[in-house]
């Protein structure tokens, strides 16, 4: 009986060792899977944003003009995260973390990008066409969802990064530069009737002075649309880019090597980027946009994979 008891004790210890080894291997496999998911989504989204900003035509930042455009966007379906802000541009600021007490970093990216240009009919009998540039306004911003991905305490709603795209707007200057009245009316009527583009944009003007209604008979209204509401194009907007892939923006945590803010020295109790930071520096035409994205993915109880990426874009800012 004594020998049997010793044998049972040895077997129990061996069973515990095997169980601990299996649990450790399982936990390691879950962590690897979570890190891989976070890495794939973070890298894909980071380089999508990099390509989009590199091809932008005008950046809208935290001055009066940028704030006006941000306020005109129809974001009701996926509201801005409370406290989210546009970056402030300083032509002389270094492309480096902000100075304490002088914040320039934001967590909203707002810019205009050329859509595919169209060839509008200027003279039907002669098949004369006019090349007209179209623009979309793009906004990338954090929002809070009703899902919860990380179930470890404290449980918080998942935060997503939205890529929002407006409907297309015709270049007002190009339309006004058509000297022949009949050709201009034909081009405008074609934009409205065939391409569904019923607003022209004075690119870069304040939002209450920038958009003019186009008529189906070829007219351009002489007064701007006020107040202006910038609509989303449901066929072009991508919505949330993380939560549907079982990932989310990582909440800012001071002292965490992955989740800490990289560009903003603000106390997290005052302002925190929560996984998305944007800083804009340089003169118009030579701007640089520094973007830092931190994504996390759950791997089960007690396991979270985190990935951070930093890129610098060089937009063709007007």
Image (cartoon, rainbow, N blue to C red):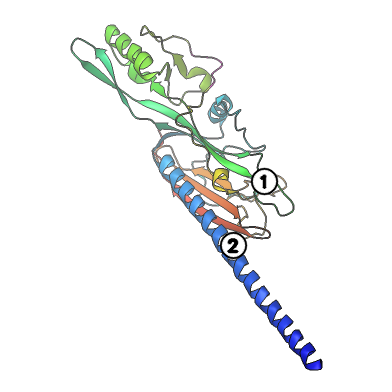
Front-most of 135 and 150? 150
User: Percent x, y for residue 172?
Assistant: 38, 19
Label 1's element? loop
Q: Provide the residue designation for mark 1.
A: 148
Principal secondary structure, stretch drawn in magenta: loop
Residue at image location 34% in from the left, 11% down from the top: 189
Q: Is residue 103 visible?
A: no
Q: Quadrant of residue 167?
A: top left
Q: Say whether residue 275 is magenta.
A: no
Point out the residue furthest to the right here: 1
Using residue 218 as the reference point, say whether residue 69 is left or right of it: right
Relative height, residue 29 to residue 288 (above, below): below
User: Percent x, y for residue 47?
Assistant: 44, 48
The label on residue 30 is: 2
Point out the residue furthest to the left here: 126
Residue at image location 34% in from the left, 17% down from the top: 194
- Looking at marks 2 and 1 on the same chain, the residue that comes earlier in the sequence is marked by 2
Q: Is residue 227 visible?
A: yes
Front-most of 57 and 133? 133
Q: Quadrant of residue 108?
A: top right
On the rendered image, what quadrant is the C terminus found in?
top left
Residue at image location 37% in from the left, 25% down from the top: 134
The label on residue 81 is: none
| Extent of the magenta region | 224-229
Q: Calculate the distance from the C-alpha at mark 2 to the C-alpha at mark 1.
A: 18 Å
């Amino acid at each position: 009986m004594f020998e049997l008891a010793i044998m049972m004790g040895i077997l129990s210890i061996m069973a515990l060792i095997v169980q601990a080894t299996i649990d450790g291997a399982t936990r390691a496999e879950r962590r690897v899977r979570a890190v891989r998911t976070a890495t794939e989504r973070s890298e894909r989204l980071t380089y999508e944003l990099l390509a989009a900003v590199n091809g932008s035509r005008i950046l809208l930042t935290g001055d009066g003009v940028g704030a006006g455009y941000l306020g005109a966007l129809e974001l009701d379906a996926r509201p801005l995260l409370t406290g989210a802000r546009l970056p402030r541009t300083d032509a002389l600021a270094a492309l480096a973390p902000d100075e304490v007490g002088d914040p320039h970093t934001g967590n909203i990216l707002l810019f205009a990008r050329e859509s595919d240009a169209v060839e509008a009919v200027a003279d039907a009998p002669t098949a004369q066409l006019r090349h007209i540039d179209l623009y979309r306004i793009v906004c990338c911003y954090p929002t809070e969802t009703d899902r919860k991905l990380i179930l470890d305490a404290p449980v918080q709603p998942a935060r997503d990064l939205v890529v929002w795209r407006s409907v297309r707007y015709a270049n007002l200057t190009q339309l006004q530069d058509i000297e022949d009245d009949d050709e201009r009316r034909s081009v405008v009527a074609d934009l409205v009737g065939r391409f569904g583009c019923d607003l022209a944009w004075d690119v870069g003007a304040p939002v209450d002075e920038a958009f003019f209604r186009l008529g189906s008979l070829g007219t351009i209204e002489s007064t701007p649309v006020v107040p202006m509401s910038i609509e989303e194009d449901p066929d072009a907007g991508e919505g949330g880019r993380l939560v549907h892939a079982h990932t989310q923006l990582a909440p800012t945590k001071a002292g965490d090597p992955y989740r800490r803010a990289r560009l903003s020295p603000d106390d997290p109790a005052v302002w925190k980027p929560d996984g998305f930071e944007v800083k804009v520096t340089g003169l118009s035409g030579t701007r640089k946009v520094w973007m830092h994205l931190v994504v996390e993915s759950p791997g089960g109880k007690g396991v979270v994979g985190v990935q951070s990426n930093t890129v610098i874009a060089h937009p063709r800012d007007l």
